[in-house]
């Protein structure tokens, strides 16, 4: 029974990881950019929400109506005017710049918000749970998982069915030729970044409710998201969801034997995948 | 009308095109010929906005587009069928065609019109572009450019690497395209193919104009082509 419970908790945790990893996976899939500031941005969104709640917004959910669009706008501007300049044959410039952004965000938060662990509260929803037999399942984690599946499903539908989705896929095949079709690749990249930043803002708030955060908790979030993306297969959205679930389940299963194994087990599974299945579970079909 | 007015193009320090001028009337056709490295592709890329001009001007219907970015030139009606076709390989043929709707131009070339006139493309519409043969790719690349209903169509070596029968099919579509009011600037290495398609010929040699005119003598063209 304990095992079943751990698997269910793991799948739910996977939902949170998927929300984190989706933006990372999407940005890599579209513009081959590994955003090392991804975790720090999630924490930034959580602090933004916290400040709005303290300033009198009733609930973090209401504050998200401001924070998510604000983060999306930040994503557009950052991509269009900063990250765009780092895109080249070499991945190094974008890695260095996003790493720098991560450090700047973490230190700004440390200076202005102190190193204390903070938490966002949704009131009764924080601890609400439903019981199935002996197993108790948190309502909020279920909501997070449902949102993650909806968000990834929606994004994947947009990618397959809409003109924007076609152009995004075209731009990751051959950006200069997309401009011959009358679309501006830089604008498409920037919108993709806006979507990724919006998603990571939701993830940051969800994590703030479920686990809490401090200025440096972005590092661990980035590592989990990164591991989920690699396990699932670079650039594949459904692979990312699968990778997140595997990571979540492994962590919670290991923790039922010994709570200290939680992190180690996840990393070990990630390494096993990296050695035996370096392209991940779902590989993108065509690359020139 | 497309006017090229005394343009220079540099790749770094290297001059790729010097003092080239030409004009293409509405509904007209002009063949640019030259050997490898003569600057033919550079000329088309400069017109489409993929390489910047060092000096000179490019005018579309009297409007200077020299500083207009490539995606806006596409919206103004300049369509390039690039060297090597450059299809989006992970997209299907139909999805490739639909991307050109980003130019937001309407006209006679709808998806249905394309499928009617290009059976080769219609048959393969749900195939991934990366899985097509060379001829099918070339036809798709031309069809994709047409979806934007261009006023000027730039064709870069559409016969390269294709079987003669396929080349004939592709050239047979040129009158069809001009009928709809699109003017064509085509680049060729094959002199005979070029002179058959167009009365007006412009010959480039090492980035400069070596000969230009109407119904030219083949011996003169050959001399201009090789610089002998």
Image (cartoon, coloured by chain):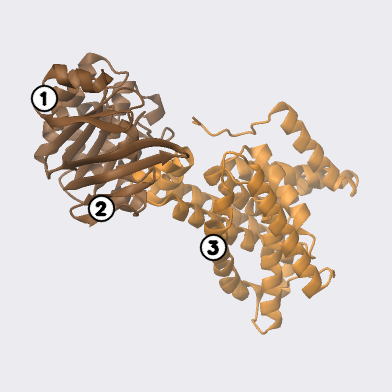
Chain colours: A orange, B brown
Question: Relative to A239, does residue B165 appear above or below in the rendering?
Answer: above
Q: Quadrant of residue A28?
A: top right
Question: Relative to A193, does residue B218 appear above or below in the rendering?
Answer: above
- Specify whether disc 2 shares its chain with disc 3: no
Q: Quadrant of residue B30?
A: top left
Q: Is residue A157 left or right of residue A12?
A: left
Q: Which mark is residue B216?
A: 1
To which chain does the residue with label 3 belong? A
Q: Position of residue B97 (x, y in %)?
A: 30, 40
- Select label 3 or label 1 by which is in front: 1
To which chain does the residue with label 1 belong? B
Identify the element where label 2 is drawn. Answer: helix
Specify few, some or many for label 1: CA neighbours under 10 Å numbering under 14, 14-19, or 20 or more: some
Q: Nearer the viewer, residue B94 or A60?
A: B94
Q: Nearer the viewer, residue A89 or A277?
A: A89
Q: Residue at x 14, y 18 (%)?
A: B218
Q: CA distance from mark 3 to mark 1?
A: 55 Å
Q: Position of residue A255 (x, y in %)?
A: 85, 47
Residue A139 visible, this angle: no
- Select label 2 or label 1 by which is in front: 1
The mark that comes first in sequence, 2 or 1, is: 2
Q: CA distance from mark 2 to mark 1?
A: 32 Å
Q: Which mark is residue A77?
A: 3
Identify the element where label 3 is drawn. Answer: helix
Q: CA distance from mark 2 to mark 3?
A: 27 Å
Q: Position of residue A196 (x, y in %)?
A: 57, 55
Q: Is residue A281 left or right of residue A249?
A: left
- Select label 2 or label 3 by which is in front: 2
- Specify whether disc 2 shares its chain with disc 1: yes
Look at mark 2 in the image and give the residue it sits on. B76
């Amino acid at each position: 029974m304990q095992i079943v419970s751990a698997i269910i908790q793991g799948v739910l945790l996977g939902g949170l990881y998927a929300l984190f990893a989706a933006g990372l996976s999407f940005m890599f899939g579209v513009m081959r950019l590994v955003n090392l500031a991804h975790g720090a941005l999630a924490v930034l969104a959580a602090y933004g929400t916290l400040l709005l709640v303290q300033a009198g917004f009733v609930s973090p959910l209401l504050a998200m109506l401001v924070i998510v669009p604000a983060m999306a706008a930040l994503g557009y501007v950052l991509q269009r005017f900063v990250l765009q300049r780092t895109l080249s044959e070499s991945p190094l410039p974008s890695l260095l710049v996003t790493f720098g952004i991560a450090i700047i965000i973490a230190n700004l938060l440390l200076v202005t918000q102190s190193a204390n662990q903070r938490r966002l509260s949704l009131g009764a929803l924080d601890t609400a749970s439903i019981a199935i037999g002996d197993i108790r399942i948190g309502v909020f984690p279920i909501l997070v998982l449902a949102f993650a599946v909806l968000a990834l499903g929606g994004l994947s539908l947009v990618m397959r069915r809409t003109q924007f989705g076609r152009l995004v896929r075209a731009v990751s095949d051959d950006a200069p030729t997309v401009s011959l079709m009358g679309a501006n690749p830089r604008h498409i990249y920037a919108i993709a970044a806006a979507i990724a930043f919006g998603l990571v803002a939701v993830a940051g708030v969800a994590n703030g409710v479920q686990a809490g955060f401090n200025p440096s908790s972005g590092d661990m979030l980035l590592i989990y998201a990164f591991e989920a993306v690699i396990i699932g297969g670079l650039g594949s959205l459904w692979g990312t969801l699968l990778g997140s679930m595997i990571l979540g389940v492994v962590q919670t299963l290991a923790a039922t034997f010994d709570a200290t194994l939680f992190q180690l087990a996840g990393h070990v599974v990630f390494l096993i995948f990296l050695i035996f299945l370096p392209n991940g579970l779902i590989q993108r079909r065509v690359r020139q | 009308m497309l006017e090229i007015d005394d343009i220079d193009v540099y790749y770094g320090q290297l001059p790729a095109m010097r003092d080239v001028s030409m004009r293409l009337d509405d509904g007209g056709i002009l063949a640019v010929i030259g050997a490898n490295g003569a600057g033919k592709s550079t000329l088309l890329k400069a017109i489409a906005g993929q390489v910047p001009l060092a000096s000179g001007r490019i005018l579309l219907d009297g409007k200077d587009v020299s500083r207009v970015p490539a995606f806006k030139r596409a919206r103004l009606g300049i369509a390039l069928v690039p060297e090597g076709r450059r299809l989006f390989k992970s997209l299907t043929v139909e999805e490739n065609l639909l991307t050109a709707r980003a130019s937001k131009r309407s006209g006679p070339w709808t998806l249905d019109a394309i499928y009617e006139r290009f059976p080769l493309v219609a048959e393969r519409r749900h195939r991934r572009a990366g899985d097509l043969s060379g001829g099918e790719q070339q036809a798709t690349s031309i069809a994709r450019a047409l979806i934007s209903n261009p006023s000027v169509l730039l064709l870069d070596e559409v016969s390269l690497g294709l079987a003669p029968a396929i080349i004939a099919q592709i050239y047979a579509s040129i009158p069809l395209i001009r009928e709809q009011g699109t003017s064509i600037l085509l680049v060729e290495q094959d002199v005979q193919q070029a002179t058959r398609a167009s009365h007006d010929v412009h010959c480039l040699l090492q980035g400069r104009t070596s000969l230009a005119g109407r119904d030219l003598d083949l011996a003169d063209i050959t001399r201009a082509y090789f610089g002998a």
